Image (cartoon, helix red, strand yellow):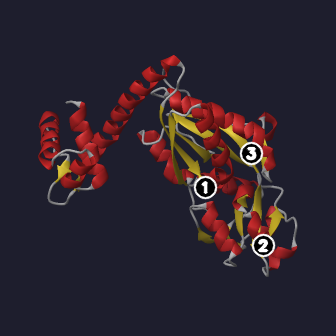
Amino acid sequence: MDVRQLAALVAVADHGTFSSAARALYTVQSNVSGHVAKLERELGVTLIDRSAGGLTDEGARVVERARRVLQEIDDIAADIASLDDDISGDARIGVIGTTGRWLMPQLLATVARRHPRVHPIVTEGSTTTIVPGVLSGQLNAAIVHLPIDDPELVVEPLFGEDLFLLVPHGHPLAGHSELPLRNLHEVPILLPPKGTALRRVLDRAAAGSGVTLKPLAEIDGVRLLSSLAIDGFGPGIVPATAMPRYAASLYARVSVPELPRRVVALIRRRRPASSAATNAVAAILSEVIAAHADEQPGVHAGPAALPAQPPRPATRE
């Protein structure tokens, strides 16, 4: 087994066909198919279903590991190049959209100024879609919201963010500046899907108040949820940064005192260790948050702004 075989398999997985993979690798199709066939012989399994044109179950598992191996090789080269204090390499960062909107301009500008040879690659998504990318090695780190309960991840809380009920003008609840959570019992509202990090926070708060939250619709993505609420589809519970200031005349922001702050955190895999490029971006991220978080309405930085986190599960060293 060698790196060329792994790279060929990953390229086929990413591009769908042997010919497309060959173009991406700047080689000929026979080289790609030969590398994949040799890897299949060495492992004793079929990795690509030639008739259906996709990965087999065994192939999907090998691709997941292969991505990590290839990334580790890239990180080794970048880390060695960084020993002269000139940090270089890719830093693939996932970020939830509401946080990325205010955080990324400052973060990317500072990274470019201090570490011009670091190449950030930013992927926007929801916590639900981003976390698997960190676990698989496709992302080096990600900015997501808690709770995250995977023992393979190191979690660094960054800041707390107030949650509000966003109510379109004309809705019966729009005349309130504050509502107790009990007033939302069985009221149809827009919610994140069951099982998502934010929904777990909301369901826990509702259970503590003896309230049942009734979903008008379940939306995995707070920016879309906010847009639907502003357009009049119905009220929804969202973090403060999901409320666009340019549309403030179209909605009411209603405080619900029983709702806790959403905690946004940086997550990375426990092993392997992060690359020098990723560590550099993470260090600048902390600086940017300390300097600019309080400029965002409803965002609170510093240890006092964060609720106590439950103890992490024990892990074997």
Q: Is residue 253 above or below residue 10?
A: below
Q: CA distance from mark 3 to mark 1?
A: 16 Å
Q: Is residue 47 left or right of residue 271?
A: left
Q: Earlier in the sequence, mark 1 or mark 2?
A: 1
Q: Residue at x 61, y 31 (%)?
A: 114
Q: Along the line of sight, which residue is nearer the eye, 111 or 202?
A: 111
Q: Quadrant of residue 169?
A: bottom right
Q: Position of residue 292 (x, y in %)?
A: 76, 43
Marks 2 and 3, Cα distance to the nearest angstrom? 23 Å
For the residue marked with disc 3, what is the amino acid?
Gly
Residue that numbered label 3 is attached to: 160
Q: Quadrant of the N terminus?
A: top left
- Judge from the rendering whether residue 41 lies leftward or rightward of residue 292; answer left or right: left
In the picture of the structure, the residue carrying the numbered disc 1 is: 97
275 displayed left or right of 241 = left
CB within 8 Å, label 2 to label 3: no
- In terms of sequence position, does the residue under pointer 3 or pointer 1 come before the other? 1
- Residue ID for mark 2: 251
